[in-house]
């Protein structure tokens, strides 16, 4: 597979970019080099390699929930711009 000037023009059009002819040639060459480099992966022997979505065998990275004491209400509301009945008071967003 290779990237043609027409492909570069199509992507540039989708991105609403105006490219000069020199830029189109340059981007096509650069993209073809990237594809050529990625094509080296075809040379690897992947027999017996299991497909994976992550390089490490991660099952669950979440920590266990643990009950801990929270801050006292007075300290929590200390820097609140406004409070009412032990809650933060904010301007209404719905009428």
Image (cartoon, rainbow, N blue to C red):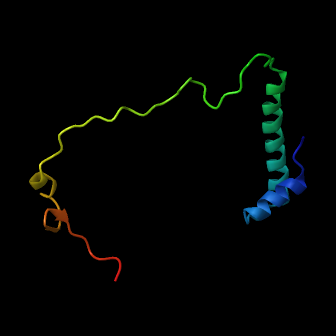
Asked if residue 6 is positioned above or below residue 70 in the image, the reply reads below
Furthest-bottom residue in view? Answer: 95
- Residue 31 falls in which quadrant of the image? top right
Residue beneath the point at 78% across and 60% down: 12
Q: Nearer the viewer, residue 3 or 74?
A: 74
Furthest-left residue in view? Answer: 74
The picture places residue 28, in percent across and down from the top left corner, at 84, 48
Which quadrant, please, contains the C terminus?
A: bottom left
Asked if residue 28 is positioned above or below residue 12 in the image, the reply reads above
Residue beneath the point at 81% across and 37% down: 35
Residue beneath the point at 80% across and 54% down: 23
The picture places residue 33, in percent across and down from the top left corner, at 81, 37
Task: Answer with left or right where residue 57 lies relative to residue 65.
Answer: right
Asked if residue 88 is positioned above or below residue 56 in the image, the reply reads below
Residue beneath the point at 76% across and 63% down: 14
Which quadrant, please, contains the N terminus?
A: top right
Q: Nearer the viewer, residue 54 or 15?
A: 54
């Amino acid at each position: 597979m290779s990237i043609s000037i027409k492909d570069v023009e199509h992507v540039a059009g989708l991105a609403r970019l105006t490219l000069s002819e020199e830029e189109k040639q340059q981007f096509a060459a650069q993209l073809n080099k990237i594809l050529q480099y990625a094509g080296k992966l075809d040379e690897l022997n992947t027999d017996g390699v299991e497909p994976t979505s992550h390089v490490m065998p991660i099952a669950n990275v979440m920590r266990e929930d643990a009950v801990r004491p929270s801050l006292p209400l007075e300290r929590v509301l200390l820097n609140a711009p406004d409070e009412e009945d032990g809650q933060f008071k904010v301007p209404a967003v719905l009428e």
